[in-house]
Image (cartoon, helix red, strand yellow):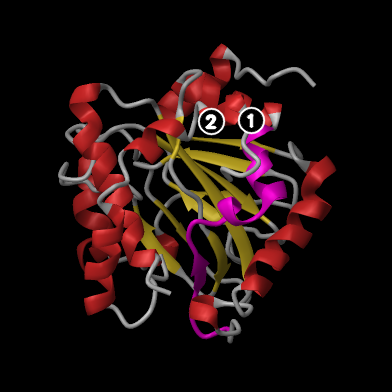
Amino acid sequence: MLHTANSQRMVHLEQPLSYQDHLIEEVRKAKTTMKEPSRG
Amino acid sequence: MDKLQLTPQQLTFMDTFGYLVFPGLLRDKIATIIDEFENVFAMHGGGHDGKPHDGTARSCLVPFIDQNSYLAALLDDPRVDGIFTSLLGENYNYLGSDGNFYVGNTGWHSDTDWSGKMRGKPPRLFYKMALYLDPVDGNTGALRVIPGSHRYGDRFAEDLQQRLRNSAELMGISGAEVPAIALTSNPGDVVVFNQNTKHSSWGGNTRRRMFTINCTAHYAEEDVPYLRNEISAFARFWIE
């Protein structure tokens, strides 16, 4: 998604990218309680 | 190709009923879309959690279009971009996609957290674009929607929220018997709905291919905590 994004596509990606610093910790926590990725 | 712009009538239909259907909108691309859909799943063992899809439960990959340059470029397509721009403004946010092999029924639900914790009260507007890659009708896995059920705070919508999951006891009907519109779909058609809209699907085979693209408007500064909620919600898909 990012690798091929032109400036127009980036308009739709930049704000979410700016606020995902906590995601690694959220994934770590999920791994402690889930046996497999969610199915929906 | 000019950027698609929804008509005032289409926007009013969406506002009133909570969904829109675009028959054949991506027919010119659908053969490659299907090939690339299969390629993404093949990269992940063919199904869920790195294992082949065995038809016993839904396989789901999140994020989905992000993993394939052709599918990611759908965001640039003037028809896809035009629909989201019409609904959400020029600087809308792309907030994820899922690729699926569906199996069996999916009961009535909204994709919005009705409590307000995730997206506020009333819930922030999110639209889901769904592409069904196999022909489906009301009894073979097509999306069924209840028109008007997206209107958070409206008595009809609130009654549905309280009653749908217990329709047999409260109304004497199964989920499949709930009055609704079935959005029959063929490959190349595009379905878009407000994520508040109550939806379900019934019947069909055990390898029904569908993927979504989800978008919302740009967040105002005071709403950024809700954006962080959305991103946190991705974690449960990323433990592979």
* Residue found at x 30% / y 40%: A19
Specify the subunit that label 1 lies on. Answer: A
With respect to residue B131, does B61 lie above or below?
below
The residue under label 1 is: A6
Residue A6 image position (x, y, % from top left): 64, 30
Q: Quadrant of residue B4?
A: top right
Look at the image and say whether residue B64 sits in the magenta stretch. yes
Point out the image quarter for the C terminus of chain B. bottom left
* Residue found at x 63% / y 78%: B46
State the CA–CA distance, disc 2 to disc 1.
Answer: 6 Å
Is residue B148 something one can see in this rendering? no
Residue B29 image position (x, y, % from top left): 80, 44
Along the horizontal axis of the image, is B196 left or right of B61?
Answer: left
Along the horizontal axis of the image, is B114 left or right of B97?
Answer: left
Specify the subunit that label 2 lies on. Answer: A
Residue type, numbered disc 1? Asn
* Residue found at x 25% / y 60%: A26
Q: Are marks 2 and 1 in contact (CB under 8 Å)?
A: yes
Residue bounds of the magenta highlight: B55-76
Residue B54 image position (x, y, % from top left): 58, 87
Point out the image quarter for the N terminus of chain B. top right
Secondary element type, mark 2: helix
Along the horizontal axis of the image, is A12 left or right of B207?
Answer: left
With respect to residue B8, does A36 lie above or below?
below
* Residue found at x 53% / y 30%: A10
Disc number placed over residue A10 in the picture, else none:
2
Mark 1 neighbour class, 10 Å CA radius: few under 14, some 14 to 19, many 20 or more: few
Mark 2 neighbour class, 10 Å CA radius: few under 14, some 14 to 19, many 20 or more: some
Secondary element type, mark 1: loop
Q: Are marks 2 and 1 on the same chain?
A: yes
Look at the image and say whether residue B208 sits in the magenta stretch. no
Residue type, numbered disc 2? Met
